[in-house]
Each structure stands twice: as C-alpha cells, then as structure tokens.
Image: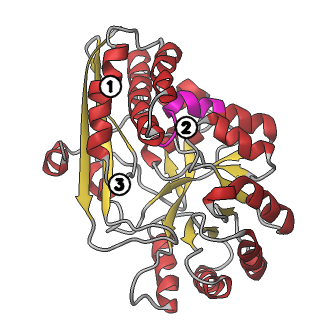
Amino acid sequence: MKIEKVEAIGVSIPLKRDFGGSTYHVRKRCAVITRIYAGGLVSEVYNGDNRSHAGEIARMVREDLFPLIKGMSIFEYERMWEKLFALTVMQGDRKTLMEAISCMDCAIWDLIGKALGKSVRELLGGYRDTLPIISIGGYYMPGKKLADFGKEVESYRKAGMAGCKFKVGGLSPAEDAKRVAVARKAVGNDFMICVDANRGWNAQDAIEFARLIEPLNIAWFEEPCHWYDEAAMMARVRKSIRMPVTAGQSEISCQGVRRLIDAGAVDYVNYDVSEGGGVTDWRRVAALCAASGIRMAHHEEAQIASQLLSAVPHGTYAECFAHPDRDPIWQRMWLNRPQAKNGVIKVVNLPGFGIELDEKMVKQYRVN
C-alpha cells in the first residue's frame, strides 16, 4: 500500500479572549490537518496548537516532505521517518520542521491502523480502552478575581473532568499560591489539581512556590524553571520538594527527553507528539520512560494522546480545554469526540485515530 498524494491544510480560528499563561499569549486556535492517500485509504488527523505558522507547516508537508516518501509503503514508517529526520541536519528552524514531520508521521500511523482495521491504541499495546481526562485552566486574564478561579475549576468538574492543570508562574510565588488555594478549596481534595509554570520561574522561586502549596495535594509541578538551564534547575527543584516534577513538552526529540531523565529532572514526561517527531518518536520516548520508572503524560492533543496513553501501562491523563471558548476544534470541529463522564473518556475504537472532522469548519477556517 503505497503513498500516492498528500493534502495538508492549516486551520486558524480566532478566540474571543486571550488565554494567557506565564510566558505566552493565546489568541487563536491553530492546527494542521493531514490527509495522505494510499491504496484507496485516506488519513484524517490534526496536529498542533501552534499560534501562527500552521500555513507554513502545511506547506512543508506538501512541498518538502511528501516528495521524499512518495511511492513508499505505509509500513516502512521507520525508513520514512529516517529520511525526513535527515533534513534536520541542515534545517535552520528545526522546531517547525519537526512539527511538519509529526504531521506526516501521525497521518502514516492513521493509515496503518486503517489498513489493518486496528486503532492506534491497539497497534501500540492496547493496555486499556478508557483514560482519565483533565482540563487545562487557571489562565491569567485582565479583571479575573480570586473567586473566579474557584468557579472556573468547579465548571471543569461539571464538564466531566477528573482534574485541572492550573497555570502559575506569572506572579510571585505567594500570589500564585493564593490562586491555587482558592481552586483547591472550591473543588475539594478528590479533584486532581496539578500546576504548570510554563518555564516561568528560576529554581529558587519554584522551590518557594512548591513549599507554599505542598498542603494542597498537588499531583505534579510542570515546567517550573526557565528554559535556558531547565534540566539542571529542575533537578535542583525536584530534590528540594515533595511533589513530582513534569516536563518534556518543549523537547522536540527523544534525545532531548533522555537528557531530562539523565539529569534526574523529571518524574513524569509529557512529550508532545505534535512537537516532536510523531508517533514513531513518541514510542521511543515511551520506552525510555518505561525503562526509567517514569510515567507518561501528554501536552494537550487529546485526539492523539488518548490513543497513545491508553496503549501503555505507564500512561496517565489526557488533557483538553474544557472552557468553551479556548478550543473550538475540540468543542465543535472534532465531530466524534468522546464525552467525558466522571473524569473518564472512552477511547475512540475505530481504525487509526478514528477522527471525524466537520468539513464545513475546515473550509471556513483554512489558511492556505
């Protein structure tokens, strides 16, 4: 079953407000839809929450990557990945290139599943068919009051979520600790809360913050430290606090994750299949973590992450955006999205990733 042609579509949807974290702003929801045609089958998968370059990634898929694998069998995924990854040696913007490679690789795995009549979950191990799911929230917004954070996390519970990944790192440790305390009080101790600083603090401030929130039963502390010496600073934080440390979403290769593990910097790895090299490289990261006693999370991308994390015994939570305005793709474009109930979703059990998209929305918001 050989690859015949590809269609890559960038999508960009303006948001009603700025969903800001400690180190970034989000004013639109973007993604790349990749359709590879092979032997009468067509992939249907979308990747990424990139802010501005969905059109460029789609162009790279069509013009730079597809010519290298045209005519190859969909089952030669390792050989194809190797050919595409070789471009990174000379490529200036490796991050964007890796996102394009991921689009192509995920589409190939979707085709493999469709060709064999198996979900990606089954192809990768089939460990379970349900998965806990949490919402990302706690965003910094003008005019937002402390009490609003309590109402926000309560809304996530009502939406069927098992917990919330709460944004911190944008204020002082003491001020952010107050925000987290309000969230915990609102939902009680049986609702999972983890915190995500998005690399917003130095090690000293991260340690101070962690000690302030230790009584609040926090599941993990994600990306606590600045990017420029992240592994060393996180290792210092991890040795100084009681809660687990999570990172990996900012890495673009399994080797980058290996460096975090070697540094003793992480308890959980949330490698993002859309930022790294797709499913093929995610499998390598999952194996590294299994061998190191480290659990797997995943940065966003529930449409893909649910298949991956449910496939392996050390998978944890899928992540989504339960706020109705944060992710129109999750809310409306993904037509057969599983509904969360009591903190759990049933993983889609269709060949490949089993994603069905609203074509009218695709056409309305396409950028190329």
User: Whole-percent x and y of residue 229?
Assistant: 69, 57
Give the residue pinned by disc 3. Answer: 330
Image quadrant for the C terminus? top left
User: Whole-percent x and y of residue 87?
Assistant: 45, 25
Contact (Cβ within 8 Å) of mark 2 with mark 1: no
In the figure, 9 relative to 227: above or below?
A: above
Give the residue pinned by disc 2. Answer: 308
Q: Nearer the viewer, residue 96 or 74?
A: 96
In the figure, 46 relative to 105: above or below?
A: below
Q: Label 3, secondary structure: give it.
A: helix
- Report the disc number at residue 64: 1
Q: Nearer the viewer, residue 76 or 199?
A: 199
The answer to whether residue 294 shows anywhere in this view is: no
Tell me the distance, in whole angstroms, between the alpha carbons under discs 2 and 1: 27 Å
Q: Nearer the viewer, residue 149 or 355?
A: 149
Amino acid type, label 2 = Leu
- Residue stretch rendered in magenta on the structure: 274-284
